[in-house]
Image (cartoon, coloured by chain):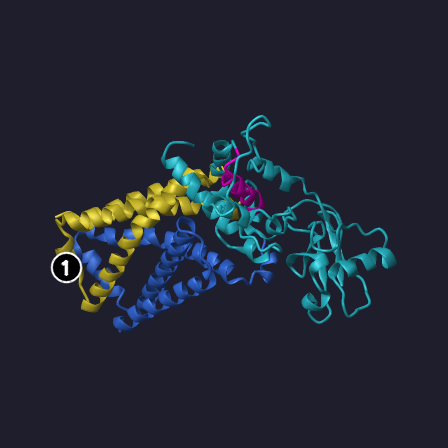
Chain colours: A yellow, B cyan, C blue
Amino acid sequence: MNVRLYVWQRLTAAIMAPLVLAHIVVIFYATRKGLSAADILARTRGSVVWASFYGAFVVAAAIHAAIGIRNVLSEWSPLQDRGAGMLASAFGVLLFLLGARAVIAVVLP
Amino acid sequence: MSLWRGAQQGRYETYKVPLRENQTVLDVVTFVQRHLDPTLSYRFACRVGMCGSCAMTVNGRPRWTCRTHVSRVAARGQLKIGPLENLPVIKDLATDMRPFFEKWQQAKGAFAPSRTRREDIEPIRPDSPARMAADAAIECINCAICHAACDTVRWNSDYLGPAALNRAWTLVNDVRDGATNERLQAVAATGGCHACHSHQSCQELCPQQLNPTASIAGLKRRTTWAYLKGEI
Amino acid sequence: MTLGHLRHRQSVLWIAALVHRLSGLALAVFLPVHFLTLGLAIRGEAPLESFLRWSDQPLVKLAESALVFLLMLHMLGGLRLLVIENLPWRGGQKEAAAIAAGLSAAIALFLLARMF
């Protein structure tokens, strides 16, 4: 862990704090109302707001989780920095691709 | 009580030592060496809590053995004493302190003068915020207890460790020092202050009541700021 | 990582750090699954709807509130760290860690209650 990775990890953490809170509120609302898929998709389809919100969330989460995984790998697995970095980057890319696909899935009209 | 005998490989051997009313762990280790087994290797110097040489692992925690009363730590009269963790073992209870001091140097933990004898002495106000920050962390005597207690040291061989970083923090706050930029670079690199997870084991166990976690947090702020400004 | 030294790791803050790490790992494992589930909607609302119906069962609801618990734990623990790292030092870290855990549990239990 160096200053560059640290800044990216703490920055994405700070960005995600309000996003997580909003997400929890959404979860409470959706489960209380017992929203069906049709209800949810009716709200998200074609919405620039939801696209931006979850788009930003996915990017931040992918970066944050990848750096976290890198730390865990380099401290708890036999992998050295390079190996841990490569595996973590691959995971970050996977998260981003799956996340972007999920956002597109619910936001595309 | 059981003592570690051997080097990196070895085993705990049991000794029977008379229990006295006022007895430190250093007393019982010394008793073993003087009366039971003269081949036991261990370190001590001042035996009054000033030098830090007698630091060992006592029932799982790194302590100054000269300042640890047996009555306080011996659960049911059992004592398990080993060398400090996270350092190579030379023999029995004595560790090789070189990696500890090498990391000290790596963190640029040495003062770099910026004036010569031909210039006036720089006046330092003891109540300036920088000097107060330095003073709060300055009493480290390099006993390596924090280094032994730190799990990030255990898990990350690159990690400079709480003592080295704590010292770097005091120097970063010393306005007389001329190597601030190099020092910030050193502690911003891989294994520097950003590897700290704030477990606070160092703070909890430091016999001088220092708080390396706080010092390291200070370094995180300074290096982040310097990084964002493009200085390092 | 050796586990033999864990017997004396009873410090609240060490446990807090472990919880933070383990919750992060759990969330990292969960996220791809979460994204794949939402991605079901790419084939229309029917696949997503049948998943939502499947997830109506009590065990899944329990798992969902456990996930919210982990997310809150990780975030509140992380916020405690951001305070340590960016603001002047303050004591009471053990108390702050305990409050973070309690608040996370409360929110997750509240969600669980509202789901039934």
For the residue pair B151 and C84, the one nearer the viewer reads as C84
Q: Residue C14, how many percent across, how many down?
A: 51, 58
- Horizontally, residue C41 falls left or right of residue B14, namely left
Q: Which residue is mark 1?
A: A38
* Residue B152 visible: no
Q: Residue B54, how many percent across, how many down?
A: 72, 52
| Residue B115 drawn above or below residue B71 | above
Q: Identify the amino acid type marked 1.
A: Ala
Q: Quadrant of residue C45?
A: bottom left
* Residue B30 visible: yes
Residue appearing at x 38%, y 42% in the figure: A7
- Horizontally, residue A74 falls left or right of residue B226, namely right
Label 1: how many residues lie within 10 Å, few (<14), some (14-19) or many (20+)? some
- Horizontally, residue B147 falls left or right of residue B129, namely right
Q: Residue B150, how many percent across, how many down?
A: 57, 51
* Chain that bears disc 1: A
Residue B165 is one of the magenta-drawn residues = yes
Q: Quadrant of the C terminus of chain B?
A: top left
| Residue B176 drawn above or below residue B32 | above
Q: Residue C84, how many percent across, how many down?
A: 43, 53
| Residue B198 drawn above or below residue C54 | above
Residue appearing at x 49%, y 59% in the figure: C13
- Mark 1 lies on a secondary structure that is helix
Furthest residue toward top: B118
Q: Give the magenta-colored segment's residue range.
A: B162-177
User: Of helix, strand and loop, which mostly describes the magenta segment?
Assistant: helix
